[in-house]
Amino acid sequence: MFKHILMPTDGTEHSERAIERGIELAKLCGAKVTGIHVMPDYRMMVAGVEMLPTGVDANMDLQAREQAKHFLSFVQKAADAAGVPCNTVIAEGQQPYDAIVDCANDRGCDLIVMTSRHRTGLAALIMGSEASRVLHRASIPVLTFRALMSADHPDRAQPKT
């Protein structure tokens, strides 16, 4: 069915749960996986900002790269434990959804597996949903796993007494 599955990660617990499920699917299908983390392009963020100490952008880039490696190590370890072939990619970009879809296209992926966090109110307006943007831009199927709600989330059903 699927031969190559792309799995974006932002290092959150929600993302890790989606990766675990995606790796289970990959194992069932005999597919390989590619984990991707999109880090901000700090050169674009600091361009035009005056008076930054020398090396600040390089330091931010180095820290983001180390964090990306940490996030992607979860994908690699989970895939290794399941016996699923895995590659990892650190991408840069101001729009994570563009980098995710471009990576899927460049690497010949036939499925994207990711988490989707439901935001409401102002957060939804400002931040939107990367999963929704990927879904609307991708030409391949996108499997989204809804993030688990905390016990105190207002949408979570209260237990019947």
Image (cartoon, grey):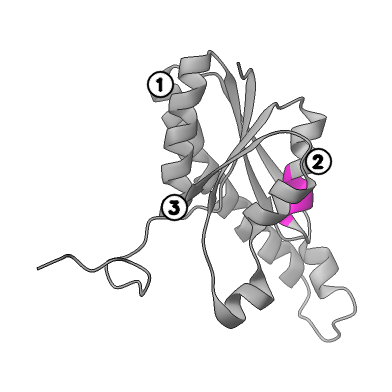
Give the distance between the C-alpha atoms of the residues marked 2 and 3, in whole angstroms.
Answer: 23 Å
Location of residue 13 with respect to 87 vertically, above or below: below
Report x, y in % for residue 23: 47, 28
- Crowd band around label 1 with a 10 angstrom C-alpha radius: few (<14), some (14–19), many (20+): some
Q: Which residues are magenta?
A: 96-100
Judged from the image, the secondary structure of the residue bearing numbered disc 3 is helix
Report x, y in % for residue 25: 48, 25
Give the distance between the C-alpha atoms of the residues marked 1 and 3, in whole angstroms.
Answer: 19 Å
Report x, y in % for residue 64: 63, 58
- Looking at marks 1 and 3 on the same chain, the residue that comes earlier in the sequence is marked by 3
- Looking at marks 1 and 2 on the same chain, the residue that comes earlier in the sequence is marked by 1
Quadrant containing the N terminus is top right
Residue ID for mark 3: 14
Apparent side of residue 145 relative to residue 91 in the rendered image (left or right): left
**Foreground mark, 1 or 3?**
3
Judged from the image, the secondary structure of the residue bearing numbered disc 1 is helix
Apparent side of residue 38 relative to residue 82 in the rendered image (left or right): right
Report x, y in % for residue 17: 41, 44
Amino acid type indicated by mark 2: Asp
- Looking at marks 2 and 3 on the same chain, the residue that comes earlier in the sequence is marked by 3
* Quadrant in which residue 78 is drawn: top left
- Can you name the residue that lies furthest to the bottom here? 51
Residue ID for mark 1: 82
Judge whether residue 106 is colored magenta. no
Q: Nearer the viewer, residue 118 or 73?
A: 118
User: Residue at point 65% right, 71% down?
Assistant: 127
Residue ID for mark 2: 102
User: Residue at point 76% right, 27% down?
Assistant: 107
Residue 15 is marked as none
User: Residue at point 74% right, 63% down?
Assistant: 58
- Crowd band around label 2 with a 10 angstrom C-alpha radius: few (<14), some (14–19), many (20+): some
